Image: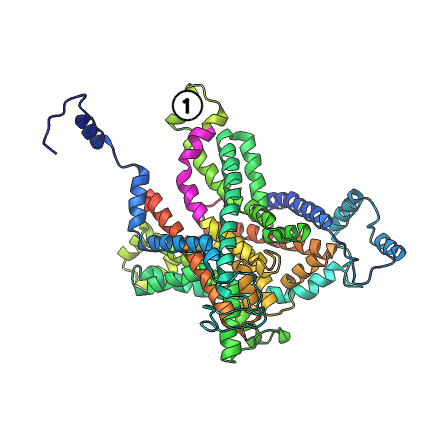
Amino acid sequence: MSTGILVPGSTKGAELMERAVKGRSLWDDARRRLLRNKAAVAGMVTLAVLALAALVGPYLAPYAYDAINKEDVWVAPLTHGHLLGTDSLGRDLLARLLIGLRVSLAIGLVATGVSLVIGVAWGAVAGFVGGRIDETMMRIVDVLYSLPFIFFVILLMVTFGSNIILIFVAIGAVEWLTMSRIVRGQTLALKHKEFVEAARALGLGSGAIIARHIVPNLLGPVVVYVTLTIPAVILAESFLSFLGLGVQPPMASLGTLIANGAQDMELAWWLLVFPSVLMVVTLMSFNFIGDGLRDALDPKDR
Amino acid sequence: MLRFIGRRLLVAIPTLFLVVTVAFFMMRAAPGSPFDMERKLAPEILKNVQAKYGMNRPLGEQYVRYLADVAHGDLGPSLKYKDKTVLQILQENYAVSLVLGLSAILIASVVGIVLGVLAALRQNRAVDYGVMALAIGGVCIPTFVTAPLLVLLFASTLGLLPSAGWNGGALPNLILPIAVLALPQIAIISRLTRAGMIEVLHSNYVRTARAKGLPEHRIVMRHALRAAILPLVSYLGPACAGLITGSLVVERIFNLPGLGKFFVISALQRDYTVVMGMVIFYAALILVLNLLADLIYAALDPRVRLA
């Protein structure tokens, strides 16, 4: 690197200067730590494969997920051209697993998105505005916390019938509470920082400060919590489906597949075992990534 | 102390009020009614039945009347089970859920604390990794997976335990349901204990105890453990919520006559009063347990002042 003299204005010099000045940002650091965490990397790879399978798998599978075949009922795995066997209606389990995985992942992502939007908005406003508004808003969260939520979700499903949109909304509306608490705590810590003062001095309103300066700086803990919320949501949906209140047939989610498998397990173990394994692998991947992200982003444990 | 309890109970009233209100209007918004049957009731009979339960009045009036009844401790009659009040149904069915929940949390506490302490004392060694793997498994493997798999293994294949039924609470019938309920709690409790123990073992007063020459088991059992399990106390409330959710699944899979099984059936049958009664019951239970957790916490940790 000692080949040339740094002449101001020469392109080479500018390039070198830039390289020298560029430091390692918080996110660079976090990425390096995350990539060094074997469990998190394994989780990411597994999840990428699963997501790809859920996305394109249903188009590639030799059978449709709802194709009933009365000839090939309860076919064992690896026989009659069914890799993972068939269920009581002769539907191919592999095709149903792929569509179930797609539904479960989609619910996980969308419902977490709903909880993210509500939680971040609620927490950021409460923390930033402060005073009596903060107290009222967080008191509401406290009250909602102490409700037996699963009952309300069940009531919601019973009341409006099971449709996928409602499952998104119902679960998302339940999961935003913790998010709002985390965001509020972070906002309280951030709002007296100099850069917020500078923004105010420049004449920005509260709304703009929250959206442009507070929220981007909350990303760390929020990202961690999001990766831990997705599996919680998948679990909640499967739980509803297991009780017969979630996704309705012939559509499938991992929860409905496990529920059906549990009914027929004495006759066809594969109907229980394969969906269960897929479910556990999915949840574990998310949890490993979440734990890895927490270790990577939390400077305390360095 | 008394003022603290009083204030918490005062906060509980609006919470319960909110629970009752939301549940009431959600239940009433549901299509269908408790009087839908296979064979349609004649219009005159339907009218009479509705009048009997006061359901011919405007919804607002029914709501106010229901609130007044609840305030007097009257949860009303069941709309589906003739000649039974909601209170009777709660009384007849809570025992099963209580036995399951209490045994599960007791077993989970003992096993979880022992595992957590062992892991903390052998940090980053085989025991620690084993316990942590178990903890991850317990969190990631949901009850509706463990329950059928355990039945498949222990009941269908090995034939050691009955696969379902209550059988008057006989021990073999209880083992699988309690195990299923306790497993995820063991995972969380052992994780919390391990984290607390590791932190405490590095604290100054433990160093002092070591410097005094106290034997290691005394340090762990008498000095460290007490502080290390503090986080567990605040976990009591969430644990209860988790057990309730779990019991909905477990009572269904093992066909046990508890409240959890009743709730889903009643909601699907639009048995308004029974559903409302159970929501109120569980909400009150969670409120009381959270209050209890705070009191125990203050009793164990002299730094906490209740105000």
Residue shown at 60%/64% (left/top)?
A: B98
Residue shown at 37%/26% (left/top)?
A: A194
**Residue B174, horizontal then vertical, whole percent:** 56, 72
Residue tagged by mark 1?
A: A199
Q: Amino acid at mark 1?
A: Ala
Residue shown at 33%/62% (left/top)?
A: B129
Which of the two residues, B210 or B279, is positioned nearer the viewer here? B279
Q: Main secondary structure of the magenta part?
A: helix
Number of marks: 1
Q: Is residue B121 visible?
A: yes
User: Magenta includes B72?
Assistant: no
Q: Name which quarter of the figure residue B227 lies in.
A: bottom left
The chain carrying label 1 is A
Looking at the rendering, the stretch of residues picked out in magenta corresponds to A210-227
Which of the two residues, A36 or B83, is positioned nearer the viewer here? A36
Seen in the picture, residue A102 relative to B59 is either above or below; the reply is below
**Residue B17, horizontal then vertical, whole percent:** 68, 45
Seen in the picture, residue A297 relative to A98 is either above or below; the reply is above
**Mark 1 closeness class: few <14, some 14–19, many ≥20 residues within 10 Å:** some
**Residue A120, horizontal then vertical, whole percent:** 49, 38
Which SS class for mark 1? helix
Q: Is residue A189 visible?
A: no
Q: Is residue A45 shown left or right of residue B10? A: left
